[in-house]
Image (cartoon, rainbow, N blue to C red):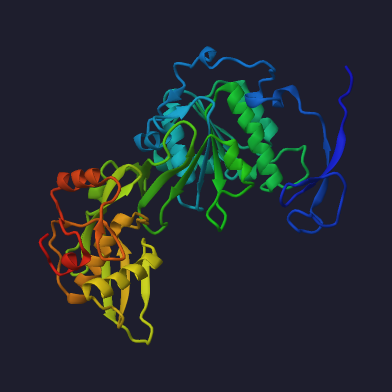
Amino acid sequence: MAKRDTKTAYVCSNCGEEFLQWAGRCSNCGEWNTLKEVTITPIAAERRGYAGVATTKSVSLTQVTLQDNHRVPTGMAEVDRVLGGGMVSGGVILLGGEPGIGKSTLLLQLADKVASRQSVLYVSGEESPEQIRMRASRLGIQQAQLEILPATDVTIIAMAIAEKQWGMVVIDSVQTLYDPQYPSTPGSLVQVRECALRLQITAKSTNVPLVLVGHLTKEGVVAGPRTLEHLVDVVLYLEGEAQHTLRFLRGAKNRFGDVTEVGIFAMEERGLVEVGNPSRFLLRERVIAPGSVLSAILEGTRPLLVEVQALTVPSSYGTPRRTVSGFDLNRLHLLLAVLQKRAGIDCSAHDVYINVAGGVAVKDPGLDAAVCLAVASSLREKTVPEQLCVFGEVGLAGEIRAVKGQKRREKEVESLGYKTSTETSVRDLVHGGKG
């Protein structure tokens, strides 16, 4: 057999850019002494084409057959909600999140559910099998079909995936893997890109659902080249505050379903627990006091009832403070200006603090009306009726506008025994109009 021709290229270990000759500085990212010599061979047959299938013939769409088990439920309703009904055979999922937020815990629990029906491979590049066993014992997981592979060489991992028909494969994490063909260190852009591509081809050719764990950068995106998110089919983020109980599983990309759905969990001693009724969960410790207002927001297509808390105190300095938790600070400045101009509520001599109870970060404009009412309630030391729920976007003219999913919000409010406000302006709302 004739030997395949090889050629030499120089790859930047920082940004992954390739060059035909060596240089002291990478012209793409500007870093010095990062170009490494790489011997490149022609792409092997198993790396040609999508999903490793080498073909030059097209096929009619009507001739493509779907498998009966193309979408498999995971056994966790909140995860299935975000995925669109379950994992797709051969689908590649990228799960990102802050360190310690619960990514490994969620995937170990997910692996436990799937392992009750099929064998699951959990590849760990960060923890030893003993450490995983300790975490599994704490979570009450005892599954013989859950197999652990402590490996970081992507060649070994690809072989292990191809050896058996797994129900799911978990890679924790993609930043720990390396391909021996490339000289850069694990976690570099080159290694992340090449290892993810190798695993993607393996998953497609074996029809095995694959989950990759990715660490986040300080900018809040998955570390590695942007092509990593293009390679995978689904991108999920596990979000939440480490000091709070709630965790939100959100979809940023989904080739097989909607990206607006949100899965909600509570972090407890026994791991992540699915929250079936998040509104009741968020309001279980509500305290009725001046500055406390109930509001209905929309997370994806799911309505949630949250408590907005406001505190106003006379300012001790020339410039009053504005502090928020779970709400946008610039939006608060705008709402305070509307309150002053349109409703006569002047907070220019007061510090204003806004908090969305429960650690929920809200971007929904429907929270505007509740924030305005909470500020007025705190400033006047008047308690808002306990059963009143307020939501709506506030315009610069002081009007309260309708928001997305209004009927769903109203239905959630009524199901929990609350009533909504009928005010259409901020002035009527904060001065106790007809609502």
Q: Residue furthest front?
A: 397
* Residue 79 figure quarter: top left
Q: Position of residue 422 (x, y in %)?
A: 15, 56
Could you tell me which residue is drawn at 35 percent across and 51 percent down?
246
Specify whether 20 is left or right of 229: right
Q: Quadrant of residue 200?
A: top right
Question: For the point 73% across and 56% down, which residue is it?
Answer: 29
In the image: residue 16, left or right of residue 375: right
Left or right: residue 115 versus residue 323 is right
Residue at the extreme top: 63
The residue closer to the viewer here, 257 or 265, is: 257
Q: Is residue 16 visible?
A: yes
Picture coordinates of residue 212, whole percent (x, y): 55, 38
**Does residue 142 appear in the picture of this structure?**
no
Relative vertical location of residue 290 with respect to residue 69 in this rendering, above or below = below
Indicate the position of residue 409 as horizontal and vertical percent values.
23, 47
Foreground: 398 or 82?
398
Residue name at image x 13 percent, y 60 percent? 386
Image coords of residue 31 (percent x, y): 76, 58
The number of numbered badges drawn on the structure is: 0
Q: Is the residue 167 above or below the residue 233 in the image?
A: above
Quadrant where the N terminus is found in the figure: top right
